[in-house]
Amino acid sequence: MQDLLEKALEAGNYIRTHIPDVPDTVVILGSGLGKLADEIRDAIEIPYADIPNFKTSTVKGHDNKLIYGTIYGKKILAMKGRYHFYEGYSMQEAAFPIRVFALLGIRNLIVSNAAGGINKKFKVGDLMLITDHIKLCAESPLRGENEEVFGTRFPNMTDAYPVEFRNLAKSVASNLKMELQEGVYAFMAGPQYETTAEIKMLATIGADAVGMSTVPEVIAAVHSGMNVLGISCITDMTGSGQQVSHEEVMKAAGEAEGRFVRLVMEIINQL
């Protein structure tokens, strides 16, 4: 873990020399949800490839850069693209940016993703506020020797998505007259989509949506004492029996992107 701490400090020091202030909030922009970055004022872009120890995503729709700037005067840092466990990275590597952000002193994390809908009350294009998650993968970003600088050996995950943040998001959505679903996000390792039997299992154990990201980052953020808000864009109804493709996921996310941008901008404004 000392190696992880050294690597995170090196990455953080590089980022710190390229931005004027520590931002209040970091936003992770999921597949097809990158246009929020266009709303960032006085933007400073830092390619992942330039940051020591950062990895890059090989997935279409992930631009591999950090963007620092302001939204409504609030200082933010946006990850335009993330890298995933299914790309061959370890859970620790997938969560590495969160370690860096925590060491920088960023306290708030807004994480987004494209997800398959399981709850039959949902429809394609819905935005879902994540109330909790189910991790269906044995690996963990916390596996191995614990580094107390980040957090305790056995972090409590019962309030991973604090109710105060969720209530703020619901209030903002209501003021915007925007429908906002709520539900439990299930993490599957991927990259293959789920079988029909797996979807039935997920529905049985209480999942409302399923995806291949977010949870490693949230675990690391909670471990490091960050406040987390999670939003899924429902890009397909996985339980409908229809075939799913990445192109269809990207298209559906793009169609919901405008509502996502308005919602997150106003949440940032009120943080």
Image (spheres, rainbow, N blue to C red):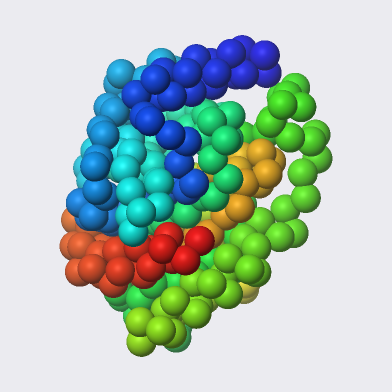
| Left or right for 27, reference 58 | right
How many numbered callouts?
0
The answer to whether residue 207 is visible is no
Identify which residue is drawn at 74% across, 59% down: 158
Check the image and report above or below for 9 versus 30. above
Vertical placement of residue 55 versus 243, above or below: above
Residue drawn 26% across and 34% down?
44
Percent x, y of residue 202: 56, 66
Q: Quadrant of residue 142?
A: top right
Image check: 144 left or right of 168? Answer: right
Q: Nearer the viewer, residue 176 or 198?
A: 176
* Quadrant of the frame with the N terminus: top right
State left or right for residue 19 relative to residue 110. Answer: left
Question: Horizontal and vertical percent for residue 83?
Answer: 39, 36
Image spot of residue 165 (x, y percent): 58, 65
Give me the residue at 41% from left, 56% from top.
112
Q: Quadrant of residue 67?
A: top left
Q: Position of residue 46 (x, y in %)?
A: 29, 28
Pick the front one: 257 or 176: 176
Residue at coordinates 49% horizontally, 46% vertically from top-left?
24
Image position of 52 (left or right of 149): left
Regarding residue 6, the answer to whether it shows in the image is: yes
